Image (cartoon, rainbow, N blue to C red):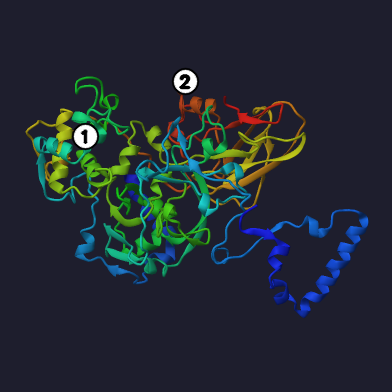
């Protein structure tokens, strides 16, 4: 039992009952007494014997609330390509932390469980929002500086978008979905469109690119196309109804819908309009020898993953279950998701749970009657511009490369994942 | 590149009535605020005035603690941090195969920017421009990209001829609703 919880009777002892003894309670008390008599007469346990312990409210629970102590789902340091770097590391730096997708409901992650990553390990800046500013300069008519209060005066937008790390890549060694796909999360972001700010400062026509820079110790900076800025990039200060958390860039960050995670610059302090690709520090990580490789390391493709049943979970008994998961695309909204329970021989259209937003996760589900036996379960998504999530072999063929066991798709791996339901109901990696 | 220039115009037309809107929010950037702009162009524009050579950089490499992570003579092996001298010499194989940021950067300004923004670990932002020029010169000389005695400064850094040359590609120009992989790059269209 949680130390905070007590039996209802213990809580009511000591005068609480007396305080609550008001006229309005009289009817309820009488009804309860009748029920107790009836239950006692039937020989069943009484209501009083059945009651759960109660949680006494304190100032913290009033102020911000907390989840049940029975809910223990948590983030863990990510394992990437078999290499795990702890967070915190020996210096207290944060690197990459994966979200427990296996326990998630609906289409957004709780802010406390949203995956988080830093470019090369970083302390999390503890920024005073009253002192933080965002400067926009470069190829603009009027270089300007905005305080947080200034940014909130502009017309706001609230949009659902996923963010995903480029290294969110599954392989045969992943034991569960947190390990295979835990470096993506979805949230409702609130802020001002970057296009609104660029109109305010008067961006010049020769500005084909912009650089976004964070205020963390390494001042990470990436170059992005102006066409993206004018389409849908957000300067976000809100997340799931409250201010951003420090791990998500408090007090302000960039949301670049569908682009690889690193572009979504946190602790945003500076935006510069420029006339050519800048080749700043973080752009080095995107250098590529081929146009194809560069394209695939830029944006996230159509992707889906089954989160139940998934690796490490178990079906306790034969019968009906809802196979459920998440689907998204870096270029559009999800149009449909198909699920296979026979290793891709046949596919069934899944139900989308609510509206599929552009560049956002959407929950899908389909009922499945498990009658024992082994099943390889797969999902694949098609987005609103017709892109279909590929299988690994399919992608290799499309790219004209030989399919070898060692081949890894360039950039973010959006290929189809398989889970295996074993005869005993346990679920394991279906690629293994 | 011609098509790239058309994109912003296209978007602006779509934005229509909102285009001219100005709210007068924020304040004009002051000279002190503009001085916080540390973004440098691959042309060398916005590089701070300064200079440094490989001999100075070699001393700084030890003094500033670079050696502790990147190894003796920048050869790596000390920690998970990469070596900064390519294992293969300048005449062996192409630049991509040789590896290392000093060899694989298309312009020397990336190396300068990386040191300036990102190093040394735990003391980022403390290196003076002269120190960054010197460390850059040390790493470029160690990789036989510039002579040992060359002094780098704001005028010649971007002109250093890098081994990788033009042998790199950018992602295709971005447009809304375009696929991740352009159809022209697929060998076997779906």
A119 left or right of B160?
right
Towards the viewer: B109 or A386: B109
Q: Is residue A347 visible?
A: yes
Callout 1 secondary element? helix
In which quadrant of the rendered view does residue B67 lie? top left
The image shows residue A92 at horizontal and vertical percentages of 37, 46
From where the camera sits, is residue A183 visible?
Answer: no
Q: Position of residue B187 (x, y in %)?
A: 46, 27
Cα separation between marks 2 and 1? 41 Å
Figure label count: 2
Q: Residues within 10 Å of mark 2 (few under 14, many from 20)?
A: few
Give percent across and percent down for residue B158.
17, 41
Of the numbered discs in the image, which one, if any, rests on residue B67? 1
Q: At x 91% / y 54%, what residue is drawn?
A: A43
Rendered image quadrant of residue A349: top right
Residue closest to the far front: A14
The subunit letter for the residue under badge 1 reads: B
The vertical placement of A143 against B124, above or below, is below
Q: Is residue A137 above or below residue A395?
A: below
Which residue was labeled with disc 2?
Answer: A402
Q: Along the horizontal axis of the image, is A326 left or right of B160?
A: right
In this view, A229 is above or below A28: above
In the displayed orientation, state which residue is furthest to the left. B149
């Amino acid at each position: 039992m949680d130390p905070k919880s007590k039996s209802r009777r213990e809580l009511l002892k000591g005068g609480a009952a007396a305080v609550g003894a008001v006229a309005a309670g009289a009817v309820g008390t009488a009804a309860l007494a009748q029920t107790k008599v009836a239950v006692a007469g039937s020989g069943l346990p009484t209501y009083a014997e059945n009651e759960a312990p109660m949680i006494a409210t304190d100032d913290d629970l009033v102020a911000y609330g907390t989840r049940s102590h029975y809910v223990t789902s948590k983030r863990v340091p990510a394992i990437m390509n078999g290499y795990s770097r702890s967070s915190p590391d020996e210096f207290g730096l944060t690197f990459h932390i994966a979200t427990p997708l296996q326990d998630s409901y609906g289409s957004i992650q709780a802010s406390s469980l949203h995956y988080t990553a830093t470019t090369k390990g970083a302390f999390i800046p503890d920024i005073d929002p009253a002192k933080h500013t965002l400067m926009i300069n470069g190829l603009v008519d009027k270089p300007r500086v905005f305080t947080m209060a200034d940014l909130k005066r502009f017309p706001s937008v609230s949009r659902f978008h996923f963010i995903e790390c480029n290294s969110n890549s599954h392989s045969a060694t992943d034991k569960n979905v947190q390990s295979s796909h835990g470096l993506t999360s979805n949230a409702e972001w609130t802020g001002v469109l970057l296009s609104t700010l660029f109109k305010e400062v008067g961006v010049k026509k020769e500005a084909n690119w912009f650089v976004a820079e964070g205020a963390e110790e390494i001042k990470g900076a990436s170059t992005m196309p102006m066409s993206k800025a004018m389409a849908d990039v957000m300067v976000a200060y809100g997340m799931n109804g409250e201010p951003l958390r420090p791990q998500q860039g408090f007090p302000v960050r960039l949301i670049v819908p569908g682009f690889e995670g690193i572009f979504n610059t946190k602790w945003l302090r500076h935006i510069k309009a420029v006339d050519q690709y800048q080749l700043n520090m973080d752009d080095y990580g995107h250098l590529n020898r081929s146009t194809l490789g560069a394209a695939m390391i830029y944006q996230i493709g159509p992707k889906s993953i089954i989160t139940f049943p998934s690796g490490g979970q178990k079906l306790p008994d034969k019968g009906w279950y809802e196979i459920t998961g998440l689907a998204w695309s870096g270029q559009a909204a999800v149009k449909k998701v198909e699920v296979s329970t026979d290793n891709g021989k046949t596919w069934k259209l899944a139900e989308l749970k609510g509206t599929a937003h552009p560049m956002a996760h959407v929950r899908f589900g389909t009922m499945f009657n498990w009658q024992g036996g082994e099943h390889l379960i797969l999902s694949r998504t098609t987005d609103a511009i017709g892109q279909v999530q590929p299988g690994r072999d399919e992608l290799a063929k499309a790219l004209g490369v030989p399919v070898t066991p060692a081949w890894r798709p360039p950039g973010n791996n959006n290929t189809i994942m398989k889970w295996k339901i074993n005869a005993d109901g346990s679920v394991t990696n279906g690629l293994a | 590149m011609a098509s790239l220039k058309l994109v912003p115009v296209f978007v602006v037309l779509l934005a229509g009535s909102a285009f001219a809107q100005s709210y007068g929010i924020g304040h004009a950037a002051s000279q002190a605020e503009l001085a916080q702009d540390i973004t440098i162009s691959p042309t060398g524009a916005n590089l701070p005035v300064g200079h440094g050579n490989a001999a100075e950089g070699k001393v700084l490499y030890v003094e500033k603690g670079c050696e502790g992570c990147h190894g003796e003579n920048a050869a790596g092996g000390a920690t998970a941090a990469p070596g900064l001298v390519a294992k293969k010499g300048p005449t062996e194989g192409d630049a991509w195969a040789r590896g290392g940021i000093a060899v694989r950067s298309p312009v020397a300004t990336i190396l300068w920017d990386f040191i300036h923004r990102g190093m040394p670990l735990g003391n980022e932002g403390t290196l003076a421009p002269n120190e960054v020029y010197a460390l850059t010169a040390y790493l470029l000389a160690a990789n036989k990209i510039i002579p040992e005695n060359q002094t780098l400064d704001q005028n010649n850094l971007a002109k250093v001829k890098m081994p990788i040359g033009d042998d790199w590609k950018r992602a295709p120009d971005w447009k809304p609703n375009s696929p991740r992989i352009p159809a022209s790059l697929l060998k076997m269209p779906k």
